[in-house]
Amino acid sequence: NFIFLWIVYKYTSNQESYKFIGRVFVNNNHFDLAHIYLQRAKELCYIDPEVHYLLAMCYLNAKDIDMAKKSLNISLEKGFGYYPAKRMLSELDNNKNSFDCDI
């Protein structure tokens, strides 16, 4: 229900709520909506590596490889080697002309 999502976006300051909703949107291929909630999660808790990883998935969907790599590097920095980001960055480096990462 979009009214619930709007209320969460407007009145919640819980970073985990935004990240959870963003993850749901990513998992259901609604990357534009995911990006909105994940940006808010990032504003509230910049050091969460999963937020940067999920944002990288949104950037990959938009074929913005540079921003995806930037988000993945931040994820690795904040998450001390966050494995999903490490794996995705490796796949991007190995497949420079392909967007076939598991998103």
Image (cartoon, rainbow, N blue to C red):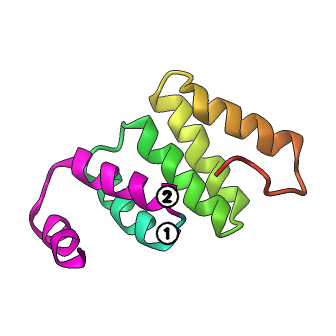
Reading the image, the residue beneath label 2 is: 26
Q: Residue shown at 78%/45% (left/top)?
A: 92
Q: Is residue 79 above or below residue 21?
A: above
Q: Is residue 6 above or below residue 24?
A: below
Observer-nearest residue: 85 or 71? 85
Look at the numbered disc 2 and give the secondary structure of its residue.
Answer: helix
Q: Percent from the top left, x then y, of residue 28?
A: 50, 61
Residue type pointed to by label 1 = His
Whether the magenta-drawn stretch holds residue 11 is answered as yes
Q: Which residues are magenta?
A: 1-28
Q: Is residue 100 left or right of residue 58?
A: right
Q: Is residue 63 left or right of residue 31?
A: right
Residue most toward the left?
Answer: 11
Q: Percent from the top left, x then y, of residue 78?
A: 45, 31
Q: Percent from the top left, x then y, of residue 4?
A: 16, 70
Cα separation, mark 1 vs mark 2, equals 6 Å
Q: Do labels 1 and 2 touch, CB within 8 Å? A: yes
Dominant SS type (magenta): helix
Q: Is residue 16 left or right of residue 81?
A: left
Q: Is residue 78 above or below residue 93?
A: above
Look at the numbered disc 1 and give the secondary structure of its residue.
Answer: loop
Reading the image, the residue beneath label 1 is: 30
Residue type pointed to by label 2 = Val
Q: Residue shown at 88%/51% (left/top)?
A: 96
Mark 2, Cα crowd under 10 Å, few <14 / some 14-19 / many 20+, is many
Observer-nearest residue: 26 or 56? 26
